[in-house]
Image (cartoon, rainbow, N blue to C red):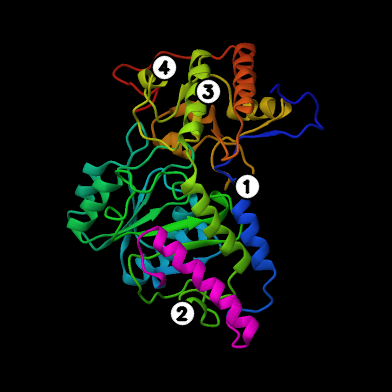
Amino acid sequence: MPPPSSNSAKPVYLDANATEPLRPSARAALLKGLEVEGNPASVHAPGRQARALLEEARTRLAQAFGREADSVVFTSGGTEADSLAVHALGAVHGRRVILGATEHAALHGAARAEKVPTEILPVDGAGRPDSARLREMLSGGPPALVCVMAANNETGVVSPLAEIAAICREAGAQLHVDAVQAAGRLPWGSRDWNEEVLREASLAVSGHKMGGIMGAGALILPHDRPLMPLLPGGGQERGRRGGTPALPALLAMVAALAESRAQDWQEIAGMRDELQARAVAAGALVAGVSAEEGAGEATTERLPNTLSLILPGVSGQTQLMLLDLAGFAVSAGSACSSGKVTSSPVLEAMGYGAQAGQAIRVSLPWNVQPGEVQAFGQAYVEMAQRLGARQPAPAAGVGWGTGA
């Protein structure tokens, strides 16, 4: 498929980590929810019908993660779920908060808003939290809430959750996992993403990252427990989160999760790897992957759809503008920075220095077509050649681009 030839052509959408296209099952569930007239809190027949659908969704979501239904607290999205975790599992209990250096801005913002003592857990050159340092940080001091992403939203790199969970368990720390990007893309049952590893952790999920719609999410607790609400209200969610639940969006979220788990992500991973090879041949670096891995078969575990490409010497903003004009929708990192194109804090924390401002994120949606990826690859190569990307030699002893 050739790239679009005019501004009127529909762009090729390669920004799924910002939001996935709506899945068919989610659309059907959404329409079903829109047909319900009642409020789940009402006691009349329409209200009971709405309540039954809400509780069915709660049960399905809980079972997907090996939990009991009452462990699920529905929210408006991942940001609220993360904020509720920091508030109810951290600040209310007097816990200090330990945040991975590459965590989502929602967690950093929540910690600042709660005014809790906060410590930053460094990451290695791949962006994985430093487990040895975490052990040191938990060896003394007050109780802690440790917040770690399951998979990074910019690089796709998967955290060593099995090791981190074991360290938290030994130290008596509460683990909270931002699972927004991983929930619909990382195969459940893998080494760092399974019921046993996460049995004592809380999880944050978001519907539109799986192929549902915006406005739905959940904080999934290890077990049923009361929480001091971040949003007090009329007693919804058993007093743990006020406000009328967005039933259609929540139904769509649960349907999207089931469909995403049934998808064979290996095909998309193959497209990503082919694109990576073309980009590296054109002079790009792959954030989170060593130079040796980038040129060959990568062994760093990543989400199957995510690729962070650094074009040395060329700003991310310039790349975005040129690719947008060519008809391709990608991003320069997190979609939660109000449209700003700046140096990536994630890549800065990974040690990429000036190159943190020379990256774009390509995140393949669930319905991407091979021709679309091939067309983007051609456009990217042509852009790199035209701009004459400059790739400096890595610093002595450094194997991650010019990073740590």
Label 3: which residue? 275
Q: Which residues are magenta?
A: 41-69
Foreground of the two, 284 or 182: 182
**For residue 338, which numbered disc appears in the image?**
1
What is the total number of numbered labels drawn onto the structure image?
4
Magenta span dominant secondary structure: helix
Q: Which one is in front in this view, the residue at disc 1 or the one at disc 4?
A: 4
Q: Earlier in the sequence, mark 2 or mark 1?
A: 2
Foreground of the two, 365 or 370: 370
**For residue 295, which numbered disc appears in the image?**
4
Q: Secondary structure at mark 2?
A: helix
Residue 43 vertical placement versus 397 (above, below): below
Which corner quadrant of the image does residue 318 belong to? top right
Mark 1 neighbour density, 10 Å: few (under 14) some (14–19) many (20 or more)? few
Q: Secondary structure at mark 3?
A: helix
Residue 338 vertical placement versus 280 (above, below): below
Q: Earlier in the sequence, mark 3 or mark 1?
A: 3
**For residue 238, which numbered disc appears in the image?**
2
Amino acid marked by disc 3: Leu
